[in-house]
Image: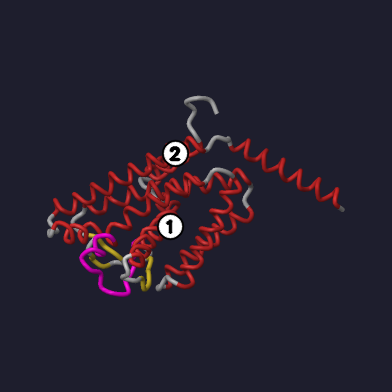
Amino acid sequence: MSLGAPSSALRAWALALLVSLVLWNLPFGGLLLYPFKLLATWLHELSHAAVMELTGVGFRRMVVHPDSSGLAYAASVAGPVARPLIAAAGYMGTPLVGGLLLVLTTSPTRARALLLAMGAALAFTAVWILDNAFGRQAIGAIAAGFLLLGALAPASLRVGVMQFVAAQACVHALLDIRVLFRAKQVVGGKEAMSDAHTMAASTLGSTEPWAVWLWAGLWLAWSLAVCFFAVQVASRTHGARPGQWIAGEELRSSSRSAQGSASR
């Protein structure tokens, strides 16, 4: 790669942002992004669930609704320390996971492992954790897609898909924060307090717009910083072009075949 040329990670992030901005403003364009939106919701709620477990509150169940909203239910009442940590986890955890996936997708072999791991995690939650029919069916279908791509997709497609999925997680983490600046938030068709409301009440003792918007703004800044840092790290570590990866895989495959023929 020549000096100054955009890396595959940067191209994936830019493409994901462009596709999201364009499609959300086109008739029915949102339908094409719908699976990625549900995936972002899944990551968001799992981030809440992970912190529930880490703080000792415990995680009970999770739901994902057709409107792409979701909820993670705690097993017990969160205390004054755990409550803000759990509230912050969703909007802070999603870009972290997206950035980590972007950095880790360094080769077709690694992309296959990540696709299969994501598929297995999605399938596990669809069967054992999700508590509503739509969530089980939708997340189960996405899991099947990840598993099929991991098992059958060619090398260049695996890398491109995994990088695009990682970039979409980062982009949706940014775009989803805009709902926190609204006066009301709807979850599953019902009005509900947002994570920013919970955070503002727990840390500032107020749910006035200024307090809610302060935390929404801080999470927006966090997401931008994480995405920027992930793209920078990925740009330095993704040294090989897709063509080089494919050639490398074909060379290793040919070498293994030759060895197998010689042993027979």
Asked if the stretch drawn in magenta spans residue 71, the answer is yes
Q: 233 or 211, which is in the foreground?
A: 233
Q: Residue at x 36, y 67 (%)?
A: 53
**Disc ID at residue 150:** none
Q: What is the residue that sits farthest to the top in this orientation?
A: 3
**Quadrant of the rendered structure where residue 54 is?**
bottom left
Horizontal and vertical percent position of residue 176: 32, 52
User: Can residue 146 be found in the magenta stretch?
Assistant: no
Measured from the top left, where is residue 129 in percent x and y? 43, 71
Question: Disc 2 on helix, strand or loop?
Answer: helix
**Of callouts 1 and 2, the N-terminal one:** 1
Where's residue 33, x and y in %?
Answer: 43, 52
Badge 2: few (under 14), some or many (20 or more) residues near its Cα, within 10 Å? some
State the residue position of label 2: 233
Q: Mark 2: which amino acid?
A: Val
Residue at x 34% of width, y 71% of height: 58
Amino acid at the residue labelled 1: Leu
| Mark 1 surroundings within 10 Å by alpha-carbon count, few (fewer than 14), some (14 through 19), many (20 or more) | many
Which residue is labeled 1 in the image?
A: 39
Question: The N terminus is located in which quarter?
Answer: top right
Single out the mark in the foreground, 1 or 2.
2
Residue at point 64%, 54% (across, down):
152
Please, is residue 107 above or below residue 82 in the view?
above
Which residues are drawn in magenta?
A: 67-85
Determine whether, in the image, residue 247 is placed left or right of residue 112: right
Q: Secondary structure at mark 1?
A: helix
Q: Is residue 1 left or right of residue 176?
A: right
Q: Is residue 133 above or below residue 194?
A: below
Return the x and y of residue 212 as percentages of the image width and height: 18, 54
